[in-house]
Image (cartoon, rainbow, N blue to C red):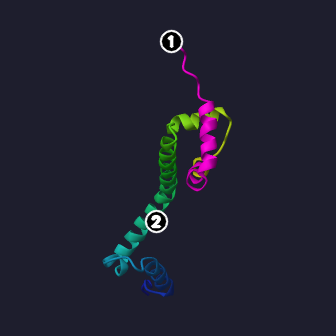
Amino acid sequence: MGRATSGAARHRKKVRLFKRVKGFRGAPGKRWRLAQEAVLRADANAYKDRRRRKRDFRALWVTRLTAACRMRDINYSRFIFGLSQANIEVNRKMLSEMAISSPTDFDALVEVAKQHQPQAAAA
């Protein structure tokens, strides 16, 4: 007796796979081998990009903070250093939101950061 290759389990497996590739352009949405490869690639990219998103958002917050700090005559690195010297622990996401939504509070933080800058040695 031959081996069964197209039973109910195999059909369920194909249905699940083709549900996942629904909407993919071209052949991967219709052909088994290409669908399998597309799903593998999609899963790999999804895993990688979940980590990448964190990097991208931090870069966005830093860019926003840099712009906000430049408007207030201090550069980003001195601002962050001043806050750390003043023992103010606010993450970059919250600082970025403050710079956008409540500029007066952000101005106060900038002043604190400026006060905690090391003074240049008089030559």
Which residue lies most toward the right here? 87
- Give the residue displayed 52% in from the left and 50% down from the top: 61
- Describe residue 81's horizontal placement relative to residue 67 as left or right: right
Which kind of residue does numbered mark 1 sit on? Ala
Q: Which residue is mark 1?
A: 123
Q: CA distance from mark 2 to mark 1?
A: 60 Å
103 within the magenta span? yes
Q: Looking at the image, is mark 2 or mark 1 earlier in the sequence?
A: 2
Which kind of residue does numbered mark 2 sit on? Asp
How many residues crowd mark 1 within 10 Å: few (<14), some (14–19), many (20+)? few
Residue 87 place in picture, x, y as percent: 68, 36
- Give the residue displayed 47% in from the left and 87% down from the top: 7
23 versus 72 height, above or below = below
Q: Nearer the viewer, residue 113 or 55?
A: 113
Start-end of magenta stretch: 95-123
23 within the magenta span? no
- Give the residue displayed 47% in from the left and 63% down from the top: 46
Q: Nearer the viewer, residue 53 or 42?
A: 53
Which residue lies most toward the left here? 26
Asked if the residues shown at circle 2 and circle 1 are in contact, with their CB atoms under 8 angstroms apart, the answer is no
Residue 99 place in picture, x, y as percent: 56, 50
How many residues crowd mark 2 within 10 Å: few (<14), some (14–19), many (20+)? few
- Describe residue 64's horizontal placement relative to residue 87 as left or right: left
Q: What secondary structure predominates along the stretch shown in magenta?
A: helix
Dot 2 lies on which element? helix
Residue 88 visible in this rendered orientation of the protein: yes
Dot 1 lies on which element? loop
Q: Which residue is mark 2?
A: 43
Residue 30 place in picture, x, y as percent: 35, 82
57 versus 83 height, above or below = below
Q: Nearer the viewer, residue 75 or 85?
A: 75
